Image: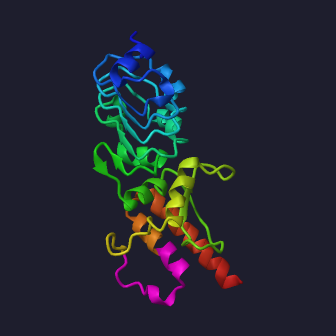
Amino acid sequence: MVKLTETMIFQRTRKNDLKYVIELNCWGSDLTDVSILRQMPHLQVLSLSVNRISSLADFECCSSLRDLYLRKNCIDSLSELSHLQDLPCLRVLWLEENPCARLPNYRQRVLRYLPQLDKLDNIPVTNEEVQLACYSDQGQPAVDYSPSPIPAAVRYCPSANSPSPSCSQANNRYNNNSYQLPTTTTPPPCDDCNYEQLSPSKSNVLRAILCLIKELDRDSLEIIEDAVHNRLDAQSCS
């Protein structure tokens, strides 16, 4: 086991106090233990590629972390990303060539945990990717019709009682006017639909639903069909 120590950090940064370390590069050092990171809340740029790190638990206290490079390590599970969800400044993450990067829907699943990322594995993250990640059929979408200065949106929430922090971060993009539902970039399956007859909020919801329908399999579509028929029957009786 190779442990990251104060001596190693001071040699690489020419600092004499961990609290003054802003950038750290320990590429290719065969590291397995980086628990000292818990003492470095001001760290902003961290390169630990080509090591043997298997857990991200020690990164939780790096509250200022902006760029994190972890290419070619030993991270097996994407659930380790939960340790990064409370890092508000994190914008760049490189996980390529870890075992977890070979998992199905890897990129989409990473963005579900960390929708605030601007770049993943050196590839820019688009708003459409974040939307599909948060609204994928692996979760239960819920439509919010409440009055709001932002458009009503289909929000992914793993449970009815406690929406995930990652989705809350994704919804913040609406407030920043930098995250919009796709319009011309992702055409809806129905080209003959007349959205002009709908209110703006309902139009946005409908566009999102139509864009997501193509992601569903036959069983999922049959569930939606039953739900639509039940809704139509209820309205006709009211």
Q: Nearer the viewer, residue 109 or 43?
A: 43
2 in relation to 196, above or below: above
Percent x, y of residue 212 = 42, 64
Q: Does residue 5 appear in the picture of this structure?
A: no
Report whether 230 appears left or right of 196: right
Magenta residue check for 203: yes
Task: Quadrant for residue 129, please give it.
Answer: bottom left
Percent x, y of residue 6 = 45, 16
Residue at image x 42%, y 34%?
22
Viewport quadrant of the N terminus: top left
Q: State the residue lying farthest toward the top.
A: 1
Residue at image x 33%, y 22%?
12
Residue at image x 49%, y 20%?
36
Report whether 89 appears left or right of 233: left
Magenta residue check for 39: no
Q: Which residues are magenta?
A: 190-206
Q: Nearer the viewer, residue 210 or 42?
A: 42
Q: State the residue lying farthest toward the right.
A: 238
Viewport quadrant of the C terminus: bottom right
